Amino acid sequence: MPKKSYPLGKVYGLLEPGPVVLLTTADGGRMNVMTMSWHAMLEFEPPLLSCVVSNRNYSFDLLMATRECVINIPTAEIAEQVVQCGNVSGATVDKFLQCGLTPVAAKMVGAPLIAECYASLECRVVDISRVKKYGQFVLEVVKAWRDPAVAAPRTLHHLGYGKFMVAGDIIQLKSTMR
């Protein structure tokens, strides 16, 4: 079948970067949670990842002020709450309360983990050189948490314009990677 021209505005849905995550921040007793899908792993050890947070988001100021956050990885079971977090601003609403999410104290950073997420990555900002131009932060994971009871997480993958794909099938192929 021959390929057809594809709208540039929809390319995002072809290359979505990974599961939708909930980025948490906290400063001066005020916590926030932001739905995010613009992220990518950069390095294995130490684990480094890149994420994009717009300077129009409330989380941007908290992240710049504290240089800490937690990347929480939800599953499809809380998809409605994940989308709801992305549809309101933390500047005016307590998203934890409104979306029914439970903050849990982290060990290495001031931002909270989210109890309802199957995994959480405590992070510190290590590079802001591309923040002004692209809103891109480089984070180092300093502590990782995972629920061992969740063997095959059904993660959400944003395809754009309210569409999501749910991952969860695992296949094992031969690999020489460690």
Image (cartoon, helix red, strand yellow):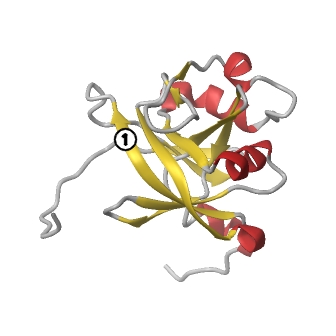
- The residue type indicated by label 1 comes to Ala
Q: Is residue 91 left or right of residue 118?
A: right
Q: Position of residue 168 (x, y in %)?
A: 36, 41
Figure check: 148 above or below 137? above
Q: Position of residue 29 (x, y in %)?
A: 71, 25
Looking at the image, residue 165 sits to the left or right of residue 107; the answer is: right
96 lies left or right of 58: left
Crowd around label 1: few <14 · some 14–19 · many ≥20 (10 Å): some
What residue is drawn where x is 30% and y is 37%? 152
Q: Which residue is painted at 15% across and 63% down in the image?
A: 178
Return the residue nearer the eye: 20 or 123: 123
Q: Position of residue 136 (x, y in %)?
A: 65, 65
The residue singled out by tag 1 in the image is 144
**Residue found at x 64% / y 65%:** 12
Residue 91 in the image, given as x and y percentages of width and height: 84, 34
Q: Nearer the viewer, residue 145 or 11?
A: 145
Seen in the picture, residue 28 relative to 47 is either above or below; the reply is above
In screen coordinates, is 70 left or right of 48?
A: right
Q: Quadrant of residue 94?
A: top right
Q: Is residue 152 above or below residue 11?
A: above
Q: Is residue 8 above or below residue 25?
A: below
Q: Nearer the viewer, residue 52 or 20?
A: 52
In what element is the residue under mark 1?
A: strand
How many marks can you see?
Answer: 1
